[in-house]
Image (cartoon, coloured by chain):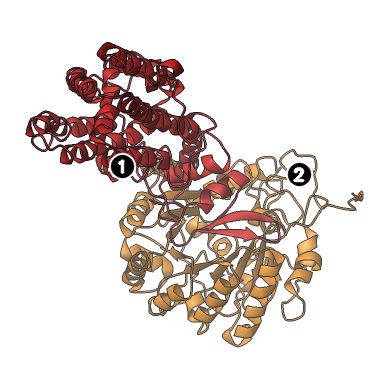
Amino acid sequence: MTAPFPTPKTEDAQRLLGPDEIEAALRDIGARRYHNLHPFHRLLHDGKLNKDQVRAWALNRYYYQAMIPVKDAAVLARMEDASLRRVWRQRIVDHDGDAPGDGGIERWLKLAEGVGFERAYVESTQGILSATRFSVDAYVHFVKERSLLEAIASSLTEMFSPTIISERVAGMLKNYDFITKDTLAYFDKRLTQAPRDAEFAIDYVKQHATTPELQRKAMAALTFKCNVLWTQLDALYFAYVAPGMIPPDAWTPGTGLVPEVTQAAGTGTIGATDVPRLPRGVRLRHDEVRGQHVLLAPERTFDLDGNAVAVLSLVDGRRTVRDIAGVLAETYAADRAVIEVDVLAMLNDLATKRVLER
Amino acid sequence: MNAVTPTGPVLPAPVGLLAELTHRCPLRCPYCSNPLELDRRSGELDTATWQRVLTEAAGLGVLHVHLSGGEPTARNDIVEITETCAKLGLYSNLITSGVGGALAKLDALYDVGLDHVQLSVQGVDAANAEKIGGLKNAQPQKLAFAERVTQLGLPLTLNSVIHRGNIHEVEGFIDLAVKLGAKRLEVAHTQYYGWAYVNRPALMPDKAQVDRSIRIVEAARERLKGQLVIDLVVPDYYAKYPKACAGGWGRKLMNVTPAGKVLPCHAAETIKQLEFWYVTDHSLGDIWANSPAFTAYRGTDWMQEPCRSCDRREKDWGGCRCQALALAGDAAATDPACSLSPLHAKVRELATEEAAETPPDYVYRTIGSNADRAVRSPLTEEAPQ
């Protein structure tokens, strides 16, 4: 099944378009399909996402950023013309940098760290959505398998990116108190890099799409790329906005974050990233006679309600408080942050009574 | 659904079993909670009977078993008994002096699943502690025992019984608990039953000392929050309301003596008219539900005024029956420790007088005929002569 793409119009489909016409047709694709139109981006830029939703975006988008040089190296490998390679290799330099600590990937990591992530967790990509991985990998495969013209045409989304970047930077700085100008340093560079790259690519397409069929292939390539970007946002929206269906193994709020400094109110205060455990001499037991769970501890018995049992059943000396809240949030389809506050209060109460440790 | 008309209050299941495995003990503390007539070794229940009692207790709904004595580790089968608790899911609490053979058996107790250790400490200063406990060289043994408990990762509670001979050491007990890595400290003012009743003039602190000890504990609780839990038992005679003895008569606790007699509290034998049943004659469940000793003061039907109409009657259950008998001459009277008792002022006065006098020598706990030691006239509403 071929994707129905309405540009060019049916009567133009068989006709060779002039250089301005092909550029207009390509821009028209972006005007209708570029991901700045996606509801997730609208929420992002308008400050309607919560911090965890912004985190989910930053985390998933990292995989795209990280694979861009892989994609560009694949394109580069197909270029037999040194003058083309000299131009194209700049993209790899832009993303990878000339040295550690430099380049677009590094700046994206800074962004991810800026919203609270552990760098290593982001780099591991273990928490990304499968849809992100499939989309990005499809892009890499596309540039390897299709013609060089299609590979280059697929990069033409850069024609549209300055608009989105301007919107994004302004919107995010204005709307999120956890976003700083430093966090968004990635986009500063892209504002100048993207137009330069796009200019080269559009010229190449104009020059090399010499038949109606090649022009249609170039347009299809750009449509494909728009879909690569759009699909990623669909998946983010589905998992983290509505219906909030986070797939198994994907990032759940609370994981992969740098521990927030929790100020101990007294010795033994348990924070969200601590791993609580029941020490020897404290046991969770079902009391068959009374038909309830109890926590048996030195010289005392705690009668437990359903909530306490749900929490303490997850205290296994391996899960963090945040993990526990995450599991409960999933089980009860509730907000993890709200649950985490309750879990912390309950566990700290038990810690104060010396029947729970970390 | 069938409508069920309850015919009476549902009998609550017991939560705790105080298993007094033996009355033998290397210490001779003058406030010992054991009765004046101590059971001899020859009369102690055997291993199989204790195991049956524990099995019945678990079936009844008991959650905590306090392995006590005397010194419970004086029994050769303490490890087997503890293991039985673990297998039955019962929470085992070893209440020990930490002396004699206790340390030698500790690792084996840990291995079979002992849950918790409550170690008694008589004092902080070794000479003072050993004078109170009546055993030379006890203190170093206790400290070594405590060290091994925390080394094993077992939760440790220090129990200090407070009286005029060590009330100046309350800060010291707190420091000691922290130093030993205890999670809990019981600062338990002496309750004047059994041997403590005999020794009351030697033990009773004055009000200022008691108040000071309470302030110290309260400050330490705040300072050591999350590190050390301190339970404070205030002395009855200076309290406003009595404590719910054993959580209420026949409501939470069963106490089995070394010979197998089952008591609602460890001092209940002082009430001579009560009929106690033995585990060798009855099942624990039968005793809990039907033994005359348990039914005598269970609930509120037996109460007199001011208890009968008091809105605290289901909070403190009238206080302690044994103390009511000892001080008021009637086990069904309001505990004179209660400020609502007509005898309360007299109790205060008595305590104040005794605390002001030079303390007599301790009458140390011994096995033998001691019943006559506790003979004292009950208080009357007129001034005592």
Whether residue A128 is visible, yes or no, is: no
Chain letter, orange in picture: B
Kind of residue sitting beneath label 2: Cys
Relative image position of residue B125 (x, y in whole percent): 31, 60
Q: Are dots 1 and 2 on a single chain?
A: no
Q: Nearer the viewer, residue B322 or B12?
A: B12
Residue wearing tag 2 = B307
Examine the rendered structure and indicate whether residue B269 appears above or below residue A256.
Answer: below
Q: CA distance from mark 1 to mark 2?
A: 86 Å
Kind of residue sitting beneath label 1: His
Circle 1: element type: helix
On the rendered structure, is A290 left or right of B193? right
Examine the rendered structure and indicate whether residue B103 appears above or below residue A319.
Answer: below
Q: Nearer the viewer, residue A330 or A308?
A: A330
Q: Nearer the viewer, residue A74 or A318?
A: A74
Relative image position of residue B385 (x, y in whole percent): 65, 52
Chain on which label 2 sits: B
- At 80% from the left and 60% from the top, the residue drawn is B296
Residue wearing tag 1 = A141
Chain on which label 1 sits: A
Q: Nearer the viewer, residue B169 or A67?
A: A67
Residue A222, which numbered label? none
- At 47% from the left and 66% from the top, the residue drawn is B362
On the rendered structure, is A81 left or right of A260? left
Chain letter, red in picture: A
Structural crowding at the residue carrying mark 1, measured as other residues with C-alpha within 10 Å and reported as few (<14), some (14–19) or many (≥20): some
Proximity of marks 1 and 2: CB atoms separated by less than 8 Å: no
